[in-house]
Image (spheres, helix red, strand yellow):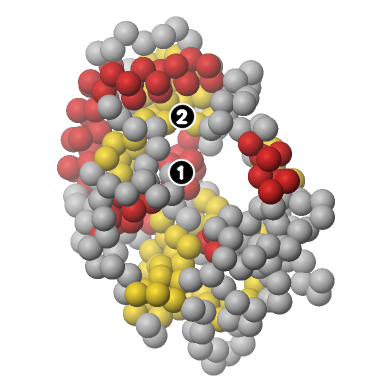
Amino acid sequence: MANDRRALGIGWSTAEARLTWADETSGPLPLGADLWLTVGADRRCVGFWRRDRHIPCPTQSELPASARGAACPECQTLDRQDSVAADTRLDDPREFSVYLAHHGTKIKIGITARQRGRIRLLEQGALASMIISTGTLLAARRTEHLVSTALGYPDRIGSAIKYAARTRPGASSDRARELLAAAGRADALDWPEGQNRVADPEIVDHCATYGLPDSGVHPRTAMLPLVPGAVVGGRLDCAIGTELYLDTDRGLTMINSRLLAGWPLDPAPPGAVFSAPTRAVDPTPPQDTQDALF
């Protein structure tokens, strides 16, 4: 393969989105910058993660362009065998936090390794969040289950709900008020041992980091699975979760970075024109579809 610099997708620092690569490098994606990429000849498995370390696919298996994820079945299995989310790693010695995340019409309960903190919330596209406790992984999981069962806060949010929230995020003061109320209800419960409650939890609003205005983002098109030789490009208006919103000659276009993963991507030549396949976006996305939980 002539080009082994394959995209992994969008990663986050605490301040900005970054385009990450299988060679363990990354490049910043500053808001307002122009991004122009040409797609290479084939799509291949990018491997999996083991305790936040990237493990390349040993066979670099070829993948269909339409695959939502960029891992072959063997790498998907290896990933699940060491997954906090799948409850296969309850002996993890690290400290874990329990958080509440605001997703527009829904507030989510979740857990994350403490050192990942805010980055985990940016990865999932939370509009705002707060850490309510820290402690062992097993206690974090039990606390998550308690709050979810007692108060009805889900531990997963469908992508359609997240997309709808981005079109009408509202004011940060409203999100703060709703998170504080949710935290108060959670604090009144009889928590299991092993999690230390945060006495004065801080609300962090993520919309400014994303470049998401109070009026929301309203894409006209969304990118479909790529084809070799396609060009993806435009000005970056917003980056949220795993999606980029580019101002293109087709209007505001949503780029799902999962569709970039596994492809070799090179800088597009001067004068290149956006040619990746797209579809029109429903201006009124559904609120309650649980079609892609993450």
Q: Amino acid at mark 2?
A: Ile
Q: Which residue is located at x 47 percent, y 47 percent?
A: 123
31 is higher (above) or lower (below) than 116 = below
Q: Given this view, does label 2 or label 1 mark the residue nearer the observer?
A: 1
Circle 2 residue: 111
Label 1 residue SS: loop
Circle 1 residue: 294
Q: Position of residue 200 (x, y in %)?
A: 30, 22
Q: Which residue is located at x 53 percent, y 16 percent?
A: 138
163 or 117: nearer the viewer = 163
Total residue callouts: 2
Q: Position of residue 232 (x, y in %)?
A: 52, 77
Q: Position of residue 256 (x, y in %)?
A: 48, 62
| Left or right relative to 104: residue 113 | right
Q: What crowding class fits label 1: few (fewer than 14 Cα within 10 Å), some (14-19), or many (20 or more)?
A: few
Q: Amino acid at mark 1?
A: Phe
278 is higher (above) or lower (below) than 114 = below
153 or 135: nearer the viewer = 153
Q: Which residue is located at x 53 percent, y 70 percent?
A: 225
Which mark is on residue 206? none
Label 2 residue SS: strand
265 is higher (above) or lower (below) than 88 = below
| Left or right relative to 264: residue 258 | left
| Label 2 – label 1 distance at C-alpha | 13 Å
Residue 237, by quadrant, is bottom left
Mark 2 or mark 1: which comes first in sequence?
A: 2
Q: Please identify the quadrant where the N terminus is shown.
A: bottom right
59 or 35: nearer the viewer = 59
| Left or right relative to 207: residue 228 | right
Q: What crowding class fits label 2: few (fewer than 14 Cα within 10 Å), some (14-19), or many (20 or more)?
A: many
Is any atom of residue 89 visible in this view?
yes
Is any atom of residue 31 visible in this view?
no
